[in-house]
Amino acid sequence: MRKVIAVIVENEHGVLARVVNMFAARGYNILSLTVAPIPNSDLSRMTIMSEGEPKVFEQIVKQLYKLIPVYKVIESDNFIEKEMAMVKFSLENNLADIDALARCYNGSISNVGEDTIVVSVVDRPVRIDNFLKAIKKFKPIEIVRSGVSVIER
Amino acid sequence: MVISGAKMVIEALLKEGVEVVFGYPGGAIMQVYDELYKYKGKIKHILTKHEQGAIHAADGYARSSGKVGVAFVTSGPGITNAVTGIATAYTDSVPLVVISGQVPVNAIGTDAFQEIDAVGITRPCTKHNFLVKSVEELPFILKEAFYLARSGRPGPIHIDIPKDVTIKEGKFTYPEKIELKTYRPTLKGNKRAIKRAVEAIASAKRPLFYIGGGAVASGSYKLVRELVKITQIPAVETLMGRGVLRHDCPYLLGMVGMHGSYAANMGMAEADLIISLGARFDDRVTGKLDEFAKNAEIVHIDIDPSQIGKVVETKYPIVGDLKLVLEDMLPLIVEKVTPERYQEWRELVFRYNELHPLTYQDSDEVIKPQWVIERTGELAPDDALITTDVGQHQMWTAQFYPFNFPRQLITSGGLGTMGFGFPASLGVKEAFPDRVVINFTGDGSIMMNIQEILTGTRYKLPVINIILNNNYLGMVRQWQTMFYQDRLSETDLSGEHQPDFVKLAESMGGIGFNVETKEEFDRAFKEALESGKVAFLNVKVDRREDVLPMVPPNSPLKNILVFKEGQE
């Protein structure tokens, strides 16, 4: 089962290692991870996507709560999930086609260089998957995904 | 007050009421030791022979006294040697503050001499740990460490202090109180949850109290005893819960689990309501999980929410400090529960005790290990404190020693650390110098921290080690016999694996006795008591004795083996 949780933590050294260790110690792979400070506070917010048994997740969440610098763990079926992807193409492609495709996924051309262009899109992770499939024919040179961030509705 | 980081450490210990530190100096922690030197007479230091010994001694001190145990070690090998001790304390929720030296801040990450990522290593085996980056944050961290160690579910805290932080000076104001936004353990149980649990108890037909280490740590044994007395509900104890009820309590079915009594395990198997008082459904207790408590609902009282529902589904969870929960619970129990209700159930489970009581076949030819435990129970004063190592002797002690009060048995339950018992007993003796302290051990375990004889001699901590010597790594041998067709791979400790324990003890200022008969045992025990020295009773016991009963690994509790094959 795929699962996304948000973890609110004290913004201090070592806290990421503590959180990530809960997954590593159980042999769980983290599919995506984003971290950034929460504005006007001394807290940070992590969004972690992983895959595995619901019972193990329940235990991971309880163990996360036990970590001293963890303030809150947010689990929800009602998240808005967003992810960003940046893709680099050769300029030899048809830019209008790429631009049109990017717009379908809340994106645009972010940069045009001498030999390459960079397109960025922001959408739900499944939609990002679709976008990456759709652009295959333009032979992307490099693809960067940001990892998912979530907020409760 | 502007003082050095090292002085802050010592000042904080004094403020926390610490009387004794166990430890071992080295390069990175020297500044702290230098400061300790200046405080001679105010704070006692016990220099062990190995860092592992220091942590186990601090652990034994903490478990027996209920205070926080404190240890100093140096960087690199100092802290890595301490890790087994820290992990032992972590698994059994023992409050420790372990302070290690570290290379200077600007040398961290350069593979400096005696540098290791100490907080990286202790992270998964501490309740929390700290790497102190500046002297300014040290006073708060010291306060936080003691607060975390003893509050909520207790546990070891590790503080790693780089050498330059111990040298630098900073302003020292020790916080009186501490509030952490991210750490607020639930102490009071939810009233409604307590009420529902009491109703479940009142309407159960076959309820059972399942008493664990939490009943010891929370200091609630008097309330537990009252609860059992009022309800007359049968009770079982885990290894960590031994002594919460007196051994002669009429409602105690004995120890539960792999080597628990027949009645205790059958009680667990047949109960319709299991009420966990600070126990955690360890795999050594549940047996095969799919078959555990099939017909029972669970009431689980625990201060650590992550324990609830971790192993078994819990219908009645109560998060809180057991003492406070029981204070709220008892009046409701008095009001709603009638002990007559469980009469039939009581008779049933106690018949199991008559059917297969905890016993052994004594012999005139050879000393049985169980006899040694029972006999010690008769010879030792009622308030004697008992430590153990890990293996067969540990289980026999838990089964046969007549425990009277909590914190009487000090044993590595969760991690099962061989080599724990002897250094732990020294810590116990330090906490209770006027009590008799006995360490039951095996000929395997005792060799793992034998060097601490010197510590016992140097600091006049005369503990009595009783070695149940069967010339085997007995527990592994028993499993090899039972489950590996008696292929005794590397478990035979006869011949040159055996030291001369008498000479060994004497060479470090102790006293030793070789015991081969019951009369010799009585005499040696008496002489050991009177000697005032670290004593070793090397008792030659029946080599092939097994620990029974036994629930075979991954079997349901009801499949408990009571007899040895071919025996009846």
Image (cartoon, coloured by chain):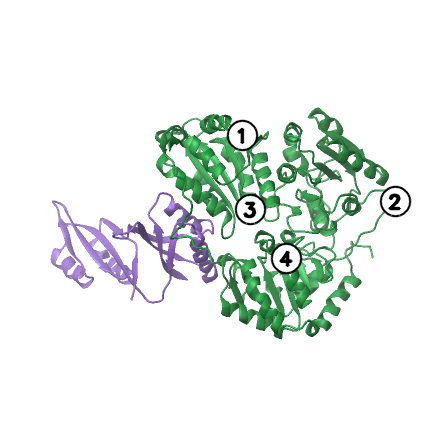
Chain colours: A purple, B green
Camera-side mark, 2 or 1: 1
Dot 1 or dot 3, earlier in sequence: 1
Helix, strand or loop status at disc 3:
loop
Q: Are marks 4 and 2 on the same chain?
A: yes
Label whose residue precedes the other's in the sequence (4 or 2): 4
Subunit under mark 3: B
**Relative to the observer, which residue lies in front, B273 or A123?**
B273
Alpha carbons under labels 4 and 2: distance apart = 41 Å
- Residue B294 locus on image (x, y percent): 61, 68
Instruction: Indicate which disc residue B94 carries.
Output: 3
Q: In the picture, residue B128 is in which quadrant?
A: top left
Q: Are marks 1 and 3 in contact (CB under 8 Å)?
A: no
Locate the N terminus of chain A and report the quarter of the image it occupies: bottom left
Q: Residues within 10 Å of mark 3 (few under 14, many from 20)?
A: many
Between circles 2 and 3, the one closer to the viewer is: 3
Name the residue rendered at 40%, 43% in the picture: B175
Question: Residue A108: x and y, percent?
Answer: 15, 57
- At horizontal 62% and vertical 60% (from top left) the residue drawn is B223
Q: Residues within 10 Å of mark 1 (few under 14, many from 20)?
A: many
Q: Say the numbered circle drawn on residue B222.
A: 4
